[in-house]
Image (cartoon, rainbow, N blue to C red):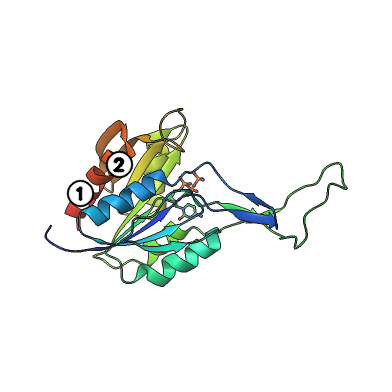
Amino acid sequence: MSKKLNILITAGPTQEPLDPVRYLTNASSGKMGYALAHAAITLGHRVTLVSGPVSLKPPNKAKFIPVQTALQMRTQVMRHFAKQDVVMMVAAVADYRPKHFSKQKIKKTRSSFTLKLVRNPDILKEICSKKRKNQIIVGFAAETEKFLQNAKQKLHSKKCDWIILNDVSQKGIGFNSDKNKITLLNQKGVFLHLGPSAKKNLASIILQKIIRSC
Ligand code: CTP
């Protein structure tokens, strides 16, 4: 390895609380983000892992920062961003959170009720707008349709260096699975298709390709 890099990785879902016992979340297991964190440590880099709630063990050598909500994830990413050479936003960040948090458990007194949601900040877009020239920022695009079109749109609208397209429409790959099928895109276009393969194998290939561009 030529250079020891500071790499920040976000992983897992976020949980957006509604009351003390309920929250909105998604099916992300954190496996891809944790596999990337392990691979980066194995390659000798310094890793900060900002993770939503998952049942995985973080690598011993990583600086581990557990969070619950998108707002907490944003705070931690912004706090550590300036020192990073590479940021990989692998987390499935909730786009919306309940507008009101009820301090008491919501009782089923009404026959129906409407939940008001408000937009969470787009962390990836925000860091891309603040990045230094020599920082590499990688986003993930979890898609169920129009895969390349949506991934290219995300790459351009968020202005990141790389987007890793993730097909989450099929059982056995993507969310909550040990395997994944991905496509790496950068501002020049499609760079590489990988998988279906174990997330662990994909993680070390992704890292090596991206680090080569540092
Ligand atoms: N992301 C983020 N902040 C958000 C939502 C997403 O930083 N509030 C990041 C994710 O970590 C990922 C990328 O943006 O790296 C794309 O996330 P994805 O859920 O695929 O797309 P969205 O931007 O949420 O757009 P949409 O839900 O409309 O597909």
Q: Which residue is label 1 attached to?
A: 208
Which of 19 and 208 lies nearest the eye of the viewer?
A: 19
Dot 1 or dot 2, earlier in sequence: 2
The type of residue carrying mark 2 is: Lys
**Which residue is depicted at the point 23% across and 53% down?**
42
Image location (x, y in percent) of residue 133:
26, 66
Q: Which residue is label 2 attached to?
A: 200
Q: Bin the neighbour count of mark 2 within 10 Å (Cα to Cα): few under 14, some 14-19, many 20 and up.
A: many
Tell me: residue 185, above or below residue 38: above
Image location (x, y in percent) of residue 94:
55, 51
Image location (x, y in percent) of residue 172:
42, 28
**Which residue is depicted at the point 19% across and 64% down?**
4
Which of 69 and 191 lies nearest the eye of the viewer?
A: 69
Disc 1 element? helix
Disc 2 element? helix
**Which residue is depicted at the point 31% across and 35% down?**
198
Rounded to the nearest angstrom, the CA distance separating label 1 from label 2 is: 13 Å
The type of residue carrying mark 1 is: Gln
Tell me: residue 73, above or below residue 53: below
State which mark lies toward you, 1 or 2: 2
Q: Quadrant of residue 136?
A: bottom left
